[in-house]
Image (tube, rainbow, N blue to C red):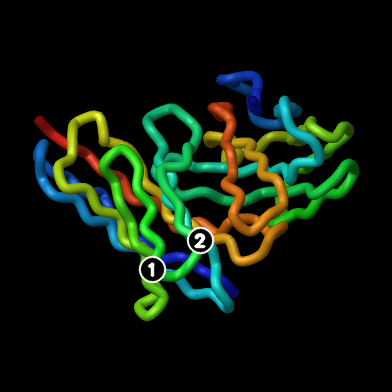
Amino acid sequence: GDSVTQMEGPVTLSEEAFLTINCTYTATGYPSLFWYVQYPGEGLQLLLKATKADDKGSNKGFEATYRKETTSFHLEKGSVQVSDSAVYFCALLNSGNTPLVFGKGTRLSVIA
Amino acid sequence: SQTIHQWPATLVQPVGSPLSLECTVEGTSNPNLYWYRQAAGRGLQLLFYSVGIGQISSEVPQNLSASRPQDRQFILSSKKLLLSDSGFYLCAWRVDGYYNEQFFGPGTRLTVL
């Protein structure tokens, strides 16, 4: 079945450091790919998405490019802030009415 | 605009007591609805989903059940809570479609003592 694999956390970075959170997927066909963020004590919210190969999703300084050849959707940010501390989830959707498939999440802590 | 509500926000219940968590969605029709559980420090576990009134799919066998009595209402229940039921429960909705994102509620923090 479909699956998403994320790098194990936690990830701890200093403010203004470069961030990469790896995400790879296994799926038949051409899934849509998503990154969600969960701030402490809250529900998840969509950070960015990409719906076809070579699409780049971006939001709030975060970017991720849909790479079909490597089945990857790595999340990057050039300069993280303390306010970016959260758990990040990679997810895929492979057909219209099936549930999203989520990775296990990566906890990011940014220290001043 | 669409909104999703969950209540209660926090709940402390003794082992063996019943449970009812409610989720309602506003501003959309015929959404797909989902219940997830997040144990402390763990990822998301899909518990149930529904594509229509009275239609429930269970992903994990357990002592929880779900019901969808109205188009935009989704209820998570248990007759007798276990310690292992403690966690953060999230409701979510999505409209059918390959590109459509999923929206999450604010969650309910359940502690079973």
Image height of B103 relative to A10, above or below? above
Residue visible at 78% across and 47% down in the picture: B50
> Which x, y percent locates residue A79?
14, 42
Q: Label 1 is placed on what type of residue?
A: Asp
Give the number of marks: 2
> Which x, y percent locates residue A107?
31, 45
Note whether residue B110 is visible.
no
Residue B7 placement: quadrant = top right
Q: Are marks 1 and 2 in contact (CB under 8 Å)?
A: no
- Front residue (pair B104, B107): B104
Q: Label 2 is placed on what type of residue?
A: Thr
Chain letter for the residue marked with disc 2 in the picture: A
Residue at the spot of label 1: A54
Residue visible at 30% across and 55% down in the picture: A75
Q: CA distance from mark 1 to mark 2?
A: 9 Å
- The mark found on residue A103 in the picture is none
> Which x, y percent locates residue B83?
58, 37
- Front residue (pair B83, B50): B50
Residue at the spot of label 2: A51
Q: Is residue A33 left or right of residue B61?
A: left
Residue visible at 38% across and 68% down in the picture: A54
Q: Residues within 10 Å of mark 2 (few under 14, many from 20)?
A: some
Q: Is residue B17 left or right of residue A2?
A: right
- Front residue (pair A85, A78): A78
